[in-house]
Amino acid sequence: MQLSDHYPYSIQGIDPIQLTKQYGSPLYVYDGATIRRKAAELQYAFAGVNMKIKFACKANTNLAILRLMREIGVELDVVSPGELEMGKIAGYDASQITFTPSGVDFEEVREAVETGAIVNVDSLPLLEWFGQTYGNSKPCMIRIKPNVAAGGHTKIMTAHADSKFGISVLLLDEILEMIKKYDIKVIGLHQHTGSDIKDAEPFLKVADILLETAKHFPDLQIIDLGGGFKVSYLPGDAITDMDLLGKKISKRFRTFCEEYGRDLQLWFEPGKFLVSESGFLFVTTNVVKEDPARNFVHVDSGLNHLIRPMMYGSYHHILNISNPKGEPKHYNVVGYICETDTFATDRELPEVRQGDVLAFLNAGAYGLTMSSNYNARFRPAEVLIDNGEAKLVRRRETMEDLLRTQTGL
Ligand SMILES: *Cc1c(COP(=O)(O)O)cnc(C)c1O
């Protein structure tokens, strides 16, 4: 756990309750040291090969986080023109950004190619359009669907046969024919299996499929194995063993490079792995309802700020940082949104009192980026703590923000 395990809770010596007083509650807080540590872990595990990290920035697009990534040598994987633009604002050169779209308007691909980003082509029609438009004048990568099911929840699997993502590996002949027809310059093969994959096995399996497929492509420079590493959700949780994975994949990759006759780059696109554990959502208890059936803790947030538990049942460890030594009790922790809005069911917490600040852990990935203004609520502020200093990196929204796009005021 990143918030220091023992009371008083702090992040790099900074008291989060103080931060909620200063910047308002609820509040997203990120620990830069954790991001640096996670990136270093990955770099260390793959030190034996030519490895590049492309942060899947849909997990967290705060510019301060993107700038931190850039500072530590992590490049970007984006899924939309908006993310591409944010990457450039954060100081990335377009050539350091990969665009991995999913069934987008081809004009978005044109925009990305023309700005200098590399595109992961994810369908045969797009491959054909790419060939007709660019011939061999621009390089591209191809997203292969390996037909392997893996991931923490069916809603976050992306590589099984029924998944919408990528071009099925069974269509290899069609892919090769298209490349030949238009003389398309394919410099990389890509795949992304899904999210919350704990074991090394699925990664090795898809690596095998991708490397086997790669033999048919003579001009490759890059093999991109995507993201999806599992992170720790509660104390003692099993996570992807990065050292083991690093050893096994590096070995397999080196053998492939020897057979291929050239040293290729190995890319990964972690989202969660880099930022999930760095982030906390701090909320305040509005009401404690001691119902005959259940005790409810109603907090000043909801699926409008953190939708993962409601969307795909993600577990977020919760700490009562105002009363860590309180008598343990069981609670349903719920939000204030008029909709199914449960963060945790029958969760044991030190007694929660009105006004207590709770910390939701693992809120650094797919937290604020998935937030909304549902129920006409404001999005929270964000604070990044780095090098021992807390900095406001996004202000809380106001009524003005909510009305900005409405006409007829
Ligand atoms: C979302 C996504 C990732 C990151 O997945 P994580 O589970 O957050 O690591 C990587 N690659 C692509 C193409 C994605 O869409």
Image (cartoon, rainbow, N blue to C red):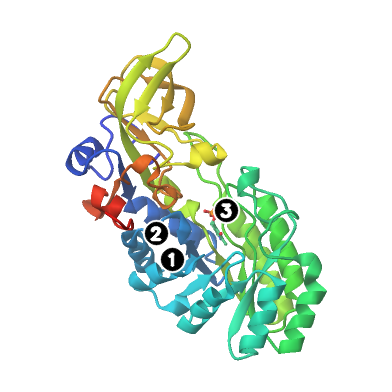
Q: Quadrant of ligand 1?
A: bottom right
From the top left corner, tell me how far across and down residue 46 is, in percent. Answer: 54, 63
Question: Who is closer to the viewer here, 182 or 391?
Answer: 182
Name the residue that disc number 1 marks.
83
Q: Between disc 1 and disc 2, whose residue precedes?
A: 2
Residue 187 seen from this side: yes
Q: For ligand 1, tell me if the residue under mark 3 lies within 8 Å.
A: yes
Name the residue that disc number 3 marks.
228
Look at 25% across and 25% down and name the residue there: 355
Q: Which mark is residue 61?
A: 2
Q: Are marks 1 and 2 in contact (CB under 8 Å)?
A: yes
Disc 1 marks a residue whose amino acid type is Glu
Quarter of the C terminus within the rendering: bottom left
Disc 2 marks a residue whose amino acid type is Thr
Q: Give the Cα distance between marks 1 and 3.
A: 19 Å
Q: Give the Cα distance between marks 1 and 2.
A: 7 Å
From the top left corner, tell me how far across and down residue 277 is, in percent. Answer: 42, 46
Q: Looking at the image, is mark 2 or mark 3 nearer the viewer?
A: 2
Q: Between disc 2 and disc 3, whose residue precedes?
A: 2
Look at 67% across and 85% down and name the residue there: 131
21, above or below 344, in the image: below
